Structure formats: C-alpha cells, structure tokens
Amino acid sequence: MVLELFLDLYSPPCRAIYIFARKNGIPFELRPVELARGEHLKLEFLKVNPLGKVPALRDGDFLLAESVAILLYLSRKYQTEAHWYPPELQACARVDEYLAWQHVAIQLPATNVYLCKSLLPHFSGQPVDVTLLERLLGRLTPALQHLDQEVLAAKPFLATEQVSLADLMALTELMQPTAVGCDLFQDWPRLAAWRARVEAALGPELVQEAHRLILQPRDPQDAQRDPQLAQELVQRLQERLR
C-alpha cells in the first residue's frame, strides 16, 4: 500500500514533511486537509488522527501524528542520507536539541505573527492590529538573535556542517511570517545567508513549490463560503493571540 500523507501546505510542519519526502524520492499519496475549511475536524480525518491535527501519516494500518515523529519515521524507514539525522551521537543530539527547542522558541511565535498578519484579517474583515503585530514580532527577536549571532556564527547550518532536519523545520517555520510581509531575515545577515544555503541544498524549485500557497494571496471568497466557520475561527484566533 502507498504511504499516505495528510497535509495542509499552509502549515509549516506539513511543508517540511512534503519537502523531505519529495527531496528524498519517498513515494507517497498526498491527502490534502484544508484547515481553513475545518476538514481536520471531520469524521473521516479524525479516524486518521483523533486529535484533529495535521500533519498525519498512514502507512497501511499504521497511523502516526506529530511532524518530528513523522520526519524521523520517514528517515528511518527509507534510510535517507545520514546528514538529515546523523548517526554520530553528538551530531544527532544537536539536531534533537533544535527540534525540541523550536516548538516554543520559533514555531509558536512565528505562527502567531502569521495568524495576526494574515489569517485573522482575512476571516474577520478587519485591518491588521499593528500594535499586536509588533508585540508578537518582539517575542521572536530573542530566538532570531540567538540563531544569527550565536548558532550561525559557529557553523553554516543549525546543527551540523550539513543541512539536517533542524534546518528544514526552521526554514518552513521562518517562512510563515516572511511570506505575508514580515521578513524575518532582513535584519539578520547570517540568518539570511543560512536561508540561501538551505534553499540551495533543498532545491529552489522544490522550496518554491512547497510554499506556493502561502506566497500567494488567499481567495477572499474563502471567508464567505461558511460564515459560521469563519466566525468560530476568528474567535479562536482572538483568544489565542490575546
């Protein structure tokens, strides 16, 4: 049976898995799940992941959730090149260190910036709350400074001398605000140079393909197709961003 990946390419972790699978020639069937339309809450998808979250994987009778777990599963099953998740103890630990750190330090604040700048105005019909946006961007600054002035001052990539799962996850997360006009790289020269190296290692065309949705404006009609769902999303976003 063909491996199935349940992804929404608006989601950074989903894009990381998509890029990883495509880059490594892993055969899979893409099962799109549109979060903005509530497809992750439908019974059909909840049978795959009862938590109602993407990404998710189905490999025959085996079901798996959580992006890091899925990336590690794919790297082990398909025995991808060692640089993605090095076998050497300390190099592997550096990848693990970043993957553990990034959830709160990068993923959460970067996603909140995106939600404030793009998704909340899209579904509410209201302008961007500039004060809130500046506050949310400020929460990212310590992590960006750490990566630019400490981590990337010592090596070309985040964990080792070659691109790894750490870099793949970081790129997709940092592209989320950048794609909607909050360029997280412009004030950090080492981080900008790192981005170029990672994109070159992954393949610029593949990176562009994976980010195509996030780089183009959302269809204004999306917010009008289901007003009740849009209202519920706005309420959830407002509660999250308080």
Image (spheres, grey):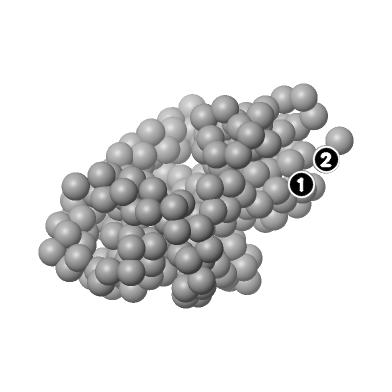
Q: Alpha-carbon neighbours of circle 2 within 10 Å: few (<14), some, or many (≥20)?
A: few
- Residue at 66 percent across and 29 percent down: it is 47
Side (left or right) of 230 relative to 129: right
Identify residue for label 1.
28
Q: Which image quarter holds the N terminus?
A: top right
Q: At x 74% / y 37%, what residue is drawn?
A: 78
Residue on which the image places disc 2: 2
Query: Observer-nearest residue: 197 or 51?
Result: 51
Hey, which residue is sitting farthest right in the picture? Answer: 1
Residue 177 image point, x, y percent: 35, 63
Q: Is residue 49 left or right of residue 36?
A: right
Q: Is residue 110 visible?
A: no
Q: Position of residue 122 (x, y in %)?
A: 38, 67
Q: CB of mark 1 within 8 Å of CB of mark 2?
A: yes
Query: Few, some or many C-alpha atoms within 10 Å of disc 1 (few <14, some 14-19, many ≥20)?
Result: some
Q: CA distance from mark 1 to mark 2?
A: 6 Å
Q: Amino acid at mark 2?
A: Val
Residue 188, how many percent across, how many down? 26, 66
For the point 56% across and 69% down, the residue is 212
Q: Is residue 232 above or below residue 120?
A: above
Is residue 117 visible to us here? yes
